[in-house]
Image (cartoon, helix red, strand yellow):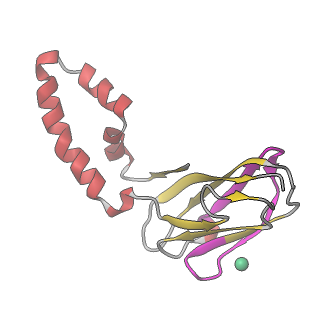
Amino acid sequence: MNFFRRSGTMQAFEVTLYPQEYSMFARCHSSTLKATAVLLCLPILLVACSTPGAHSPLLSAEPAIDAVLTRPPRTLRLFFAALPDVSRSNITLLGPAGEYQLRGLHTMAADDLMIEILEPAATPGDYTVQWSTVVGDDPMEYTGSFAFHVQAD
Ligand SMILES: [Cu+2]
């Protein structure tokens, strides 16, 4: 899995992307106006989808997104489309033993964020990396998460 969302000035625009929000919008209109509502929403959806910022800036990660590992990683490294602002970034790691302590968020100046896992537990199971960041000249704050899995040897 690989989820992301962004927040900022474009948020009101974004709600049109969610089906449940759309059906609420449709309910506000009489059924005879539903077709009109669809026609009105369509260009908005197209514009929202063509906005470059509407896509996750996360390109790849180490461990890789959805990777299956036999050894727990000692560091997490996330690669983005532009240089992240470290002071406005955050990474958390959740696993079978709960939340892991992370230390030393930094960038290696390769459009990346890197952080050390203080006590990498050898617990097999599903791990989730949650991230938030601001990259390049884009004022939006992006948040997302992805999974990797540790298998017993
Ligand atoms: Cu580093």
**Going by the image, does 120 lie left or right of 90?**
right
Residue 41 on the magenta segment: no
- Magenta: main secondary structure equals strand
Q: Residue furthest bottom?
A: 109
Please tell me which residue is depicted at 81% across the width and 49% down the height of the picture: 124
What range of the chain is rendered magenta?
88-113
Give above or below for 39 relative to 53: above
Quarter of the rendering containing residue 132: bottom right
- Residue 63: x percent and y percent? 67, 64
- Residue 101: x percent and y percent? 82, 57
Q: Quadrant of ligand 1?
A: bottom right
Give above or below for 74 relative to 127: below
Please tell me which residue is depicted at 56% across the width and 71% down the height of the picture: 79
Please tell me which residue is depicted at 36% across the width and 52% down the height of the picture: 10
Please tell me which residue is depicted at 23% across the width and 53% down the height of the picture: 47
* Closer to the camera in the image, 73 or 71: 71
